[in-house]
Amino acid sequence: MHPLEQLRDDALREIEAARDEKSLEGVRVKYLGKSGSISEWGERMKTLGKEERPVVGKLLNQARNAVTAALDQRGEKLRAEKESDALASMDISLPGTPHDTGSLHPLHQMHELAEGPDIETEWYCFDALNTPPDHPARNEQDTFYLPDGRLLRTHTSTVQIRAMESAPPPIRVIASGAAYRRDELDATHSPQFHQIEGLYVDENVSVADLKGELEFFMRELFGADSEVQFRPHFFPFTEPSLEVYVRSKALKGGEQWIEVAGCGMVHPAVFEAVNKARGDNAYDPEKWSGYAFGLGMDRLAMILFEIPDIRLFGQNDLRFLRQFA
Ligand code: DAH
């Protein structure tokens, strides 16, 4: 047997005997590495005579190919074994690695349905809502203006106009989202807060419908034994206008009346503004009437979740948020 054949057989035996990838690599280096015993025959070729050279060259190639193939095969097998060992030793009954799933922000839990843009024109925020430029209500709702004259909406009542512009009566709309005012930030005021807006326009809608709906809503929210009170107020876009107060044993103290919403019957001037924008008389104030309301979401969430400070909503502190998960 030629020594190359002997080396080849030794290598194949050692490859078969290798129990892990590291010892397999040892075998490769020993025989096929730069100064491995099979590789050395490549150098030795140069010293051989013309007759012998092609014979040894052939043997060398065969040895190299056989050993390389065996190394590949054994390597593959060892890797597969290692993987199935890892799987076999895995206890699938163990609990998984827990990871944080996050949860809905308390304001988000109160937030549903239609939306309008936060950045609005003065027309949607004021003019169309019967609040012309010289109206004192504009001072009470001072906000942040963009260089192009647009503003951050001071209430979600803007969505009333957008809804009526895009669909004829009868309509029912609930919209919610952020509103902005130039208020100093303290425990009960924030330059950004959130509202829920409601609008219902149909034939023969009356204050009785408005009161019925809001009383129902408040009792669903604060409990069946809640008391609801409507007090006269002023809003430019409703006539008459009312404020909604709630008192409930479920709420702190149970003695105090808490103001939770503004509401009223849609002012005919609002319908007229919408008609002008639409270019028709779809919201004919002689034919249609409606009620609207606006609720402060932050306030409601603070009462319901017993949150003492409005600033907590905006701080994204997980210790706060996890209490409502
Ligand atoms: N937009 C009013 C505010 O932010 C709240 C309000 C009052 C909304 C009366 C209404 C309404 O829809 O009819 O103070």
Image (tube, rainbow, N blue to C red):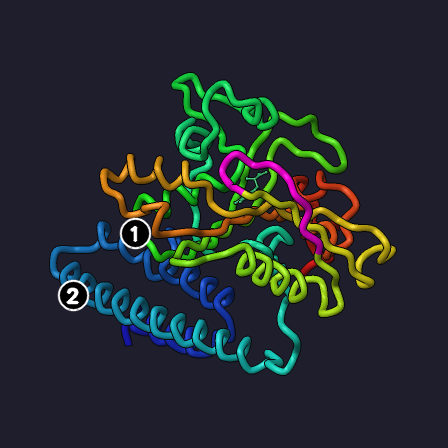
Report crowding for label 2: few under 14, some 14 to 19, many 20 or more residues within 10 A (C-alpha): few
* Three-letter amino acid code at the position of disc 1: Pro
The reply, left or right, for residue 164 in relation to residue 249 is left
Q: Which element is circle 2 on?
A: helix
Looking at the image, is mark 1 or mark 2 nearer the viewer?
1
Task: Answer few, some or many: residues within 10 Å of disc 1's Cα (few below 14, many 20 plus, some between 14 and 19).
Answer: some
Q: Position of 95 compared to 309: left or right?
A: left
Identified at 42% across, 78% down, the residue is: 16
Q: Name the residue under label 2.
A: 55
Residue 108 % position (x, y): 57, 53
Q: Which mark, residue 283?
A: none
> Looking at the image, which is closer to me, 170 or 174?
170
Q: Which residue is drawn at 86% across and 55% down?
A: 255
Q: In which quarter of the image is residue 95?
A: bottom right
Residues 323 and 264: in front is: 264
Magenta stretch containing residue 235, yes or no? yes
**Above-or-below relation of 7 to 299:** below
Can residue 49 be seen here? yes
Range of residues picked out in magenta = 229-239
Residue at horizontal 37 percent and vertical 41 percent from the top? 271
Give how far across and how far down residue 210 sits, in percent.
Answer: 55, 56
Spatial separation of the CA atoms under disc 1 and disc 2: 98 Å
Q: Is the magenta stretch mostly helix, strand or loop?
A: strand
- Going by the numbered disc 2, the residue's amino acid type is Val
Looking at the image, which is closer to me, 129 or 158? 129
